[in-house]
Amino acid sequence: MEAAISPVPDDVEALKALVATMARRAEEAEQHAATVAAELANAHARESAIEAVIAHLKLQIAKLRREQYGASAERSRRLLDQMELQLEDLEADAAEDDLIAEEAAARTTTVTALERKRPARKPFPDHLPRERVVVPAPCSCPACGGDRLSKLGEDVTETLEVIPRSWKVIQTVREKFSCRDCEKIAQAPAPFHVVPRGWAGPSFLAMLLFEKYGQHQPLNRQAERFAREGVPLSVSTLADQVGAAAHALMPLYKLIEAHVLASDRIHGDDTTVPVMARGKTDTARLWVYVRDDRPFAGSDPPAALFHYSRDRRGEHPQTHLAAWSGILQADAYGGYNELYREGRDPGPVLEAGCFAHARRKFFELADVVSSARKKSRGQRSSMTYPIALEAVQRLDALFDIERGINGTAPAERIAVRQELSAPLMSELHTWLTAQVAKLSRGHDLTKACLYMLKRWDAFTRFLDDGRICLTNNAAERALRCIAKRVSLCTPYSSICKHWKHVRVNNATRATLSGHRRFYRFRHQIGGADLMRCARYDLHCRKHAGFDEKSYRMA
């Protein structure tokens, strides 16, 4: 049954009172609706903030667990990346809900907007230029209208802004003149181009190479971005410029090679790189030779020289160092043995052992913490050997001495080593020999001991030469910058013809977009990178082979 409607009064004053009452009720209803909306917006903002905090804590817990328990499976890495992407979305949603809650709270006087705790923002870098924009001051007092105003100070608000990339075509005009006396034509010489008869300027070429080899952006993706900016360039056109620029960088590469091989002592190492082959994935190699004279107070700048090969045969380092002789700090790879041969032309290479490799073999057998963690998780833990633990302690004593003389002159390093390290090395040799006599031939500890004893001359050479370092870590550090997560399976072997010439931030491997089952990760780096690690280009779904032309020499 419908409620009875009150009759409308005929009296004018009564009508006015009724209208006022209805207006007041409508205003109260509107205020109530605004209050409810503000409270609801606050609730949504609070929920979004809580979800973001929970996701952040989950991500931190997952990272800590991985660091603690050493989980390194590909599935674990993908899970962390996915969690980071989810955290980004949740934080963006929380920021949007905060603004909605503030706008809703501004329409009511009874609800206070939710204030989400945010981490303090770091100040903008000092090297960024500052553009000062002064807001005109008032001419009179807004309170009393007086014009006697004096400056007390100022409030400065900094806003980060970016200048969008702009394109331009430079027209170089060379006027022709005819000589009235001899009828010859005079004209200024043509402008210099990095690439002969090239149309691309040096800034464009630098950007193209940096995006490809530094930011790991394939050429097809760059071409699409250029087209959106109004500059259509085909992939084949860009590939020609990459090859031509790599050829132009060859003299610089030769200078780096000459600088590295001019040193009497270098570090050598190699790492694997997967290469797509017909129906399978091959394992190729990247070789690095590092010159770093800083440990013995050398004044020459450090540099890294890279080479590429389809396999790990010993002929490759022998070719790389065919005209070089000196001290090579490297691991015990058998391919270097021909370099150490007496009678070698132009001279034998002296081997310097890496104590980090030797220590690692003992450390794996003495890792008490790792064994305890495996046992607590119900996994089969490897045995912990007191002999291995003592070996690690003996080697650590040598490392402690080296830290004190790092960066000093060779003569000073030799004096300290003869005084402090030589007795420790003598004791270590006696101790290792005694352990080998007690252990079985096939035991892991025996193999670790023999690793040093068989190469004792190489391991003791640092006592008489202050230029030699205790480890080969300089070469390993040089390889870390190319063994990145963004570097995937190489589509073609010819890639390294260009990669080794384009050296960005010490070194970086070219864009290596994976395809189908050739998907391979390299070492992990921090941060989510799912887009560049996808099996396909997530934007255009193009095969990495479309980028192959950039791997051809101009």
Image (cartoon, rainbow, N blue to C red):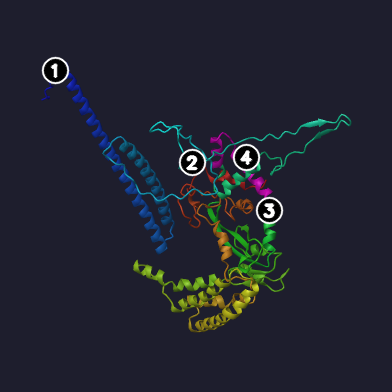
Give the residue displayed 76% in from the left and 32% down from the top. Answer: 175
Q: Earlier in the sequence, mark 4 or mark 2?
A: 4
Vertical relation: 343 (above or below) 523: below
Mark 4 vs mark 3: which is more N-terminal?
4
Residue 65 position in % (x across, y down) = 38, 61
Disc 3 crowd, CA 10 A, few/some/many (<14, 14-19, 20+): some
Identified at 52% across, 83% down, the residue is: 431
Query: Of the numbered discs in the image, which one, if any, rests on residue 237?
Result: 4
Q: Are marks 1 and 3 in contact (CB under 8 Å)?
A: no
User: Which dot, 1 or 4, sits closer to the camera?
Assistant: 1
Q: At which x and y percent is residue 77? A: 43, 55
* Disc sitting over residue 539 in the figure: 2
Q: Earlier in the sequence, mark 2 or mark 3?
A: 3
Which amino acid type is marked by label 4? Thr
- The residue tagged 1 is 9
Judged by depth in the image, the label closer to the viewer, 1 or 2, is: 1
Residue at the image position 40 percent from the left and 53 percent from the top: 79
Nearest the camera: 296 or 110?
110
- Which image quarter: residue 257? bottom right
Q: Amino acid at mark 3?
A: Leu
- Element under label 4? helix
**SS at mark 3 in the image:** helix
Quarter of the image with the N terminus in it:
top left
Q: Is residue 442 visible?
A: no
Left/right of residue 19 with respect to residue 264 in the rendered view: left
Secondary structure beneath dot 1 equals loop
State whether residue 40 is above or below residue 512.
above
| For the residues bearing labels 4 and 2, Cβ distance under 8 angstroms | no
Gap between marks 1 and 2 measured at Cα: 70 Å
Q: Amino acid at mark 1?
A: Pro
- Residues drawn in magenta: 220-249
The residue labelled by disc 3 is: 252
